[in-house]
Amino acid sequence: MSKWFVRKTRTRSLSRLSFFSTSGNSQPFLAAIFLTVATIVLGPTCARADVDDVKLVGDDQADRAASGLRLFGRPWVVKRDRGDVAPVSPAAPQAVLGSNILGPTGRSWMQQTTSGVRAWNGIACDATCTTLVAVATSELVYTSTDSGATWTEQTGSLFAGYQGVASSSDGTKLVAVALDLYIQTSDDSAVTWTGQPASAAGTWWWVACDLTCTHVAAVETFGYIYTSTDSGVSWTGRAEPRSWLRIASSSDGTKLAATDFDRIWTSDDSGVTWIARDSDRGWIGIASSADGTRLIAAANGGFVYLSIDSGVSWTAQPALGARNWQDVACDSTCTTMMAAEYGGNIYVSDDSGSSWVAQSQAGSHEWNAIATSADGTKLVAAEFGSTVWTSILKVAPLKHRGDRR
């Protein structure tokens, strides 16, 4: 593990915060940070009484202790020593094409500057990636109905420290999570939002849902995994307090996969029971195919890993190298997959991971969240402290029989 750590800043900052080192001189400071955060965050969280007793397979007391101490109250992300990050892209009134030629995978990338320069943390889209929704730190929710070309500030939402957002396949039902706020839901494509008090105002970090956003799962860092079967109105606590970072869902909500900083966990009963899988890699992003059998996950400062058996076993993708991975995504079959490096490139595979191509046309940025359409032809990516980017795969039209052109 690198000696430097960063986290998503709670304020409107245009870059992540290099917070502290693990040198001997920093030990008193770290102790003070831990005691303060433990009192503020862990105290209220551990005091909750609405959490079911559930079976955790493969757990042990040592892992619980390590999980509880490593991240000091927030998910700290490993920051590799990579020098200066790419400059923040300037705002402009129109989209900017990355270059005059198509990218190496046949994709063209557009910088959608109408999204504005924001501290983007989460992004999601409907099945076709025509309707997009994105959230940022200390902002309202933003949506696009034209694949990212134009964006609308949804004044029915709240100014909040949003961390993640999920969308139904038709884009009408949305769920957003933020720090110290009830989980927010919308059933009219983000025009109006409802805070769900049954979720409590937690340190929410990520959220996922099934195709209809009826079955919803959210993770609370140094808290529990919570699930809902009624579009977010009522919630049930699952698993145990851990440094949860991301969660992914199958299309029917029965298979879930979640990452804490130490492990990948999977569930095949809508979150009632959880099984510990591959561990001790600094896990962060995770994404699932529609049927939940294929998964892609990234270890921050390590490799991208793939699973074809619902998370039982994992295969590293060494050709991608060990990088400062931040998020991953895949289409409904995990044939087209994406991996985003914070402070680097986006990498795309169109053959289930057999080969990967850096999307040099999009450039090197602080990529923070990505998503893909169900068929993998449309990709979206959000920079932390800059803009949203979109990509469309140019498919050659079928020639008519007898057409010799």
Image: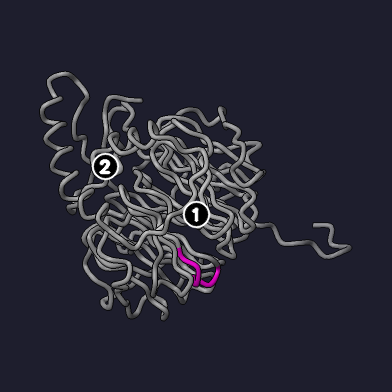
213 inside magenta stretch = yes
Q: Which residues are magenta?
A: 211-216
Q: Residues within 10 Å of mark 2 (few under 14, many from 20)?
A: some
Q: Which residue is at the front of the view, 163 or 229? A: 229
Q: Badge 1 is on which residue?
A: 248
> Which residue is denoted by mark 2 in the rendering?
7
In this view, the mark in front (2 or 1): 1
Question: Toward the viewer: 212 or 400?
Answer: 212
Q: Which part of the image, by quadrant, shows the C terminus?
A: bottom right
Report whether residue 196 is seen: yes
Quarter of the image for the N terminus: give it.
top left
> Where 199 sits versus 72, above or below?
below
Specify whether residue 309 is painted magenta. Answer: no
- Could one spot residue 378 in this view of the protein? no
Q: Position of residue 290 (x, y in %)?
A: 61, 58
Say which label, 2 or 1, has the lower sequence index.
2
Give the percent coordinates (x, y) of residue 28. 11, 27
Mark 2 is on which residue type?
Answer: Arg
Q: How many angstroms separate mark 2 from mark 1 (CA)?
A: 21 Å
Describe residue 395's horizontal placement relative to residue 104 as left or right: right
* In the image, farthest residue toward the top: 24
Task: Find the residue positioned furthest to the right.
Answer: 402
Label 1 SS: strand
Position above or below: 85 against 214:
above
